[in-house]
Image (spheres, grey):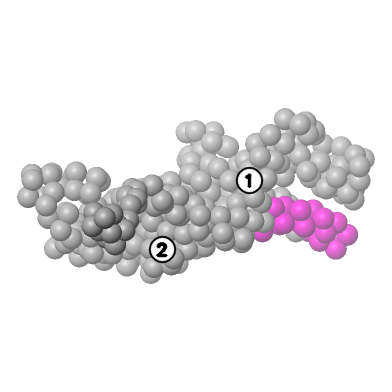
Amino acid sequence: MLKRWLNRTFTIPEISITSTTAGQESLTQEAWRKFRGNRQAMLGAVVLLIIVLSVVFGPLIYSVPINKIDFAKSTLPPSWEHPFGTNDLGQDILARILYGGRISIAVGVFSMVVAITLGILIGALSGFYGGWLDVVLMRLTDLCLALPRLPLLLLVIFLFRDAIKAIAGAELGIFVLVVLVIGGLNWMSVARLVRAGFLSVREQEFVTAARALGASPRRLIWIHILPNVISPVLVAATLSVSTAIVTESTLSFFGLGFPPDVPTWGRMLYDAQNFLEFAPYMVVFPGTAIFLTVLSINYIGDGLRDALDPRLS
């Protein structure tokens, strides 16, 4: 009886021990959850995906020649035969927008790669080593920031476009020159972001431990520190794509971008500026393409910034 009473009085409850890691989100999953919850970012991603798929596969489906001249169909308004109308040479505007979108978006992406590469390299070296190297690189960054970008961009294109055309051809040469110049004038903000991140991370305990274990400076930079400061760089990368698209459009609008037979969105705006009064659709459709692309990329950049910010739950 005493044994039964003790068992009833001091019953030890069953304890269920489960792993807490099973319910935890990884950093990637958490960032995706935050990004997915941002309606503007998701809208921007959907719109950008539609634009990219359209310019990649659209010319294969809508196979209208982009350079076929037919003056009998000059400046026709939108119709079933020509959904976006025709330009002053009778060329189909929709076909030219689809083809030109490939070039405009490619300029944005490759210019971003150039800007991010230069920015990470300069910012990492400056933030990791410090001292006189930091002073020299940051003064160079300040100097580049102080330069008027658009006049300098126009001057470089004007001076070197003929030489690069002779070397690599009209279309490829201008593409390489535009990418290098735009990317070379947009790395400064990335360099400052990377430098600031390196200055804060390089003094943390895990970096000190890795250094004590004999890790080389190269390994410390690329393996231990850079992955911890890459979040703002990803945001800057998305925004630099939109900046490059707008800059390329500005160059083409001033007549210093691609040749007339290459229908980038900016070039189409330049060709249509004299027809605003009686053929406004020649401006509306390429301008809308630029507007939607840049706006969607900016929304994605804002969503990435919020998703990768650890201070936001």
Residue situated in front as seen by the camera: 67 or 298: 298
Residue plotted at (13% across, 44% down): 216
Give the amino acid type for the residue marked by disc 1 in the picture. Answer: Leu
Q: Would you place residue 50 above or below residue 127 in this image?
A: above
Which image quarter: residue 247?
A: bottom right
In the image, is residue 302 part of the stretch drawn in magenta? no
**Relative side of 142 to 273, left or right:** left
Is disc 1 surrounded by few (<14), some (14 to 19) or many (20+) residues within 10 Å?
Answer: few
Q: Residue furthest front?
A: 1
From the top left corner, tell me how far across and down residue 167 is, in percent: 47, 33
The magenta stretch is 274-291
In the image, is residue 276 part of the stretch drawn in magenta? yes
**Which quarter shows the N terminus?**
bottom left
Which mark identifies residue 49?
Answer: 1
How would you classify the magenta stretch by its main secondary structure? helix
From the top left corner, tell me how far across and down residue 244 is, in percent: 52, 54
**Which quarter shows the C terminus?**
bottom left
Which image quarter: residue 296?
A: bottom right
From the top left corner, tell me how far across and down residue 189 is, in percent: 38, 62
Residue 301 in sight here: no
Q: Name the residue carrying label 2.
A: 309
Residue 58 in sight here: yes
